[in-house]
Amino acid sequence: MVKSTGPSSPEAAVLKALAELHRTRQFDALYQQATVLVARFPQSFALHSFAGAAARALGFSEKAERAFETALRLAPEDPGSHFNLALLASDQGDLTTACARYRAVLAIDADHVQALNNLGSLLTLLDDIPAAIAALNRARAVSPRSPEVHISLGNAFKRAGRIVDARAAYGRALEADPACASAYGNLGALELEHGDLARAGAAYRAALACEPEHAALRVELLHLLAKECDWDAIAAERPLIAQMGVTTPAVAPFGVLALEDHPERQLERSRKWAARQCRSAAAPMPARPRTRPERLRIGIFGSDFHDHPAMHLMAGLLGAIDRERFELHAFNYGHQPEDAYRRQARNLVDEFHDVAGWSDARIVARAHAAGIDIALDRKGHTTGSRVELFAGRPAPVQIHYLAYPGTVCVPAIDYMIADPVVVPSAQRCFVAERVIFLPHCYQPNNDQRPIAPLATERGDHGLPEQGFVFCCFNATYKITPREFAIWMRLLHAINGSVLWLYRDNDRAVANLQKHAAQHGIDPARLVFAPRMPSPEHLARHVHADLFLDCFAMGAHTTASDALWAGLPVVARAGEQFAARVSASLLRAVGLPELVTETDAQYETLIVALAEDRPRLAALRARLAANRQTHPLFDTALYARHFESGLTAAWERWYAGLEPADIVVNAV
């Protein structure tokens, strides 16, 4: 990093001693000694470089910048100062300046591998994928055995959706360094995202064998184990879970939601993760217009404009928004192929912006050109997230909505949309954003969702014609031993009953069957439902008698699916947002008696309903009637409340007021 002594430098032995302090990370001593020496040798490039490096390590950004700028003036032909200034700009979140500095390095030394690698990595973060791949291919040509370069190239390929190329790049990194935890970790994430759980698990375990203290990788493995329902393996890690992302470095918070119900620790995980993910400096707030626009322009930013639960929920809302007051823009940065849901989204918004592969800066510029007034972040801390682009302020008001069930802690996000059930007053302190409280349920629902005509019988799904069918179509990672033990007691209590579960993956099926046998239940009483198109999936709910929700992370879209299809849901309300969604849905559909507060209440209520068929039939009849009369499935009513919340947030900004909690009154 530091080279070339330049004129008027101290003796070589002194510089060697400073270099040793730098190597051993004794930055306090390095800063003190370099600062004293700079006063004696003000023309020494090396001393200013050492002083800047120490100041940067100690967090003295302004002093570091002054030192590096001085070094640059003393030796403008040396790429080291540009490189150091690039590192500093990256530390400060100014990725655009960092890229410019790396390009300045390359103008002097076109084969500077670290500059090529770092530039490519930053361009990947900014979603300028073609430029990223070009820089990284150049780095690979210069240094074909560098694991870091191959990993960076794999990350760029992954971001571009080039899965085979990404896998090959991670493989080349491991050929160069068979003990590279980062390469194994990135490979594991790639395999998990694309459904190969066996290969993902092997990669994560190999990564942790190389680096046992890597908390983020451990959480990724735990989430994988949860998907597989490998509870014995999770139990071995259970003492560590509470500290993951709290006392350890940052971890992806989504992976912990189903492992524990603890809103305070989830707040800290989100805070740390946001600090790691959102490195760009905040852009200034846009100037207020002189006059209020006739229509507020709403920008919806996400990657789920395809056959995805979020699109199933939002389609009705998009069609119900008052176009005389609002203009809708979709900004799609997902790489999924065109499908019927994408075409539907195009038809439901005023303008559909295909921005996949665009840099953050380019997307923000497009949003500014479109005059977006309110930006909705539709991803949060979930797969495909691009929360960093909101640092560029695509809109003066920015709101997290619907995707990640909890606080995101992104400084540029002003609000989160919730309701008084998912964020009760006792939990409000664990939400970093200001909250827009909708009066009934935060979740939109589409009252035009098609349900296919019933064309099957129970036997077609492997279900008994007469027995009681308990149902849970949640993703398998949400199921834990706690609720599963209750479900097994229910099967013991209700003769001839079965449990109908979603077939997520073969490993989960085998493990759930094993767990059932351990509880003394014939594994054949667990019936597994494969993935089906939404209309047919909704139709098959008629064959179930009662939906049983999970605890730490319950059913969200899955619960509204069941209720829309006419199937009652029993909820056990927890503490965190993710554990309270089905409770919110049930209250909004007029069935609050199906919300329980303890495990014992949950089990007792389910047994009572299973043993009292007339009572359950009356509940189903009420649900069928309430679908037409209660707020949950009144899409037009939801749209009015949603519009009121967004308008109130924008009016506060227009009036020069800071964001504040907004309570939307029912109309």
Image: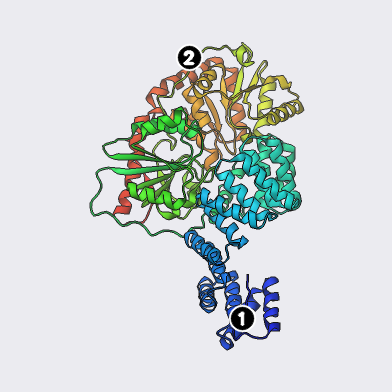
At a point 29% along the width and 53% down the height, the residue shown is: 654
Tally of numbered tags: 2
Residue 364 at x, y percent in the picture: 41, 51
Give the crowd class for mark 2: few <14, some 14-19, many >=20 residues within 10 Å: few
Asked if labels 1 and 2 touch by Cβ distance under 8 angstroms, the answer is: no
Cα separation, mark 2 vs mark 1, equals: 78 Å
Q: Is residue 571 visible?
A: yes
Residue 461 is left or right of residue 131, and the answer is right
Q: Is residue 244 visible?
A: no
- Residue 34 is marked as 1
Residue 599 at x, y percent in the picture: 62, 34
Q: Nearer the viewer, residue 489 or 268?
A: 268
Vertical comparison of 590 with 620: above or below: below
The local secondary structure at tag 1 comes to: helix
**Amino acid at pointer 1:** Ala
Residue 501 at x, y percent in the picture: 62, 25
Vertical comparison of 539 with 478: above or below: above
Residue 658 is left or right of residue 81, and the answer is left
Q: Nearer the viewer, residue 140 or 542?
A: 140
Residue at the disc numbered 2: 453
At a point 44% along the width and 35% down the height, the residue shown is: 443
Q: Nearer the viewer, residue 226 or 29?
A: 29
Q: Nearer the viewer, mark 2 or mark 1?
A: 1
Quadrant of the image for the N terminus? bottom right
Give the crowd class for mark 1: few <14, some 14-19, many >=20 residues within 10 Å: many
